[in-house]
Image: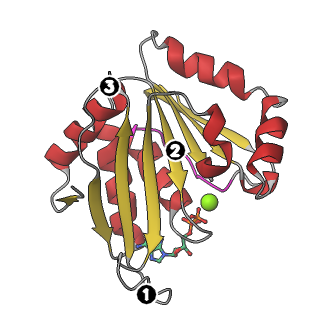
Amino acid sequence: MKTMQPAPVVVESNSIEETEAIGRRLAQALTSNLVLALKGNLGAGKTTLTRGIVAGLGIEARVTSPTFTLINEYTDKAAPHRLLHMDSYRLGEDPQVATAEVETLGLDELLDDVEAGGDQGLTVLVIEWAERLASLLPKDHLEVRLDQGDLSTSDLNSDRRTLTLTAHGVHSAAVLEAFAMIQPLYFRAR
Ligand SMILES: Nc1ncnc2c1ncn2[C@@H]1O[C@H](COP(=O)(O)OP(=O)(O)O)[C@@H](O)[C@H]1O
Ligand SMILES: [Mg+2]
């Protein structure tokens, strides 16, 4: 039997600052370790959102694209949490190639860390270009799709972004519900 999943939450952003604020609220909604699967084109705002999540976890750090390192880890002496930031962009468009390559890079262990939970703080794994690693994503993950423009026009010249958050699994469902409580403007997709 398939468990009930909450309807996706759709949030609009009109600036970098708003996207960062959405990320901070997402971090505030986290109650357990989680994988966040970010999907969307170059410039959609995935790294910007990640910046907000890092800040929301109380981690003071300059978040950059882990384009060459593939995985960056952010921690802070003043915060119990840690954020792992992964970017599959460099692995290329072919999901099979990307998946094979990332398996050699120890993603498994990172996923085990996220699964294990425990400790005092949270471990959050953010994956940019998660669509390329679909087969490696744990069953329980929060999917965040970022689209340029609004959903109907996708005007690439504007600062508008549409974020669609979809829960997969019980932990991500709880996070999505908590997020919906603190995110001021959103609508339910269905
Ligand atoms: N509402 C918005 N949210 C996030 N980024 C925006 C927004 N409007 C414009 N931008 C611009 O889009 C780009 C997003 O970059 P980035 O977050 O690195 O995207 P990605 O990681 O998806 O490639 C930045 O140049 C940023 O200035
Ligand atoms: Mg990026």
Q: Residue at x 49, y 90 (%)?
A: 157
Q: What x and y, as percent, mark residue 16?
A: 42, 70
Residue 63: image location, x then y, percent: 59, 52
Residue receiving disc 1: 158
Q: Viewer-proximal residue, 21 or 12?
A: 12
| Residue 86 placement (x, y as % from top left) | 65, 43
Q: Which residue is mark 2?
A: 37
Quadrant hosting residue 181:
top left
Q: Disc 1 residue type?
A: Ser
Q: Say the numbered circle drawn on residue 170.
A: 3
Q: Earlier in the sequence, mark 2 or mark 3?
A: 2
Please name which of the two marks, 1 or 3, marks the residue nearer to the observer.
3
Q: Residue at x 50, y 86 (%)?
A: 156
Q: Which of marks 1 and 2 precedes in the sequence?
A: 2
The part of the chain drawn in magenta is 57-65
* Amino acid beneath label 3: Val
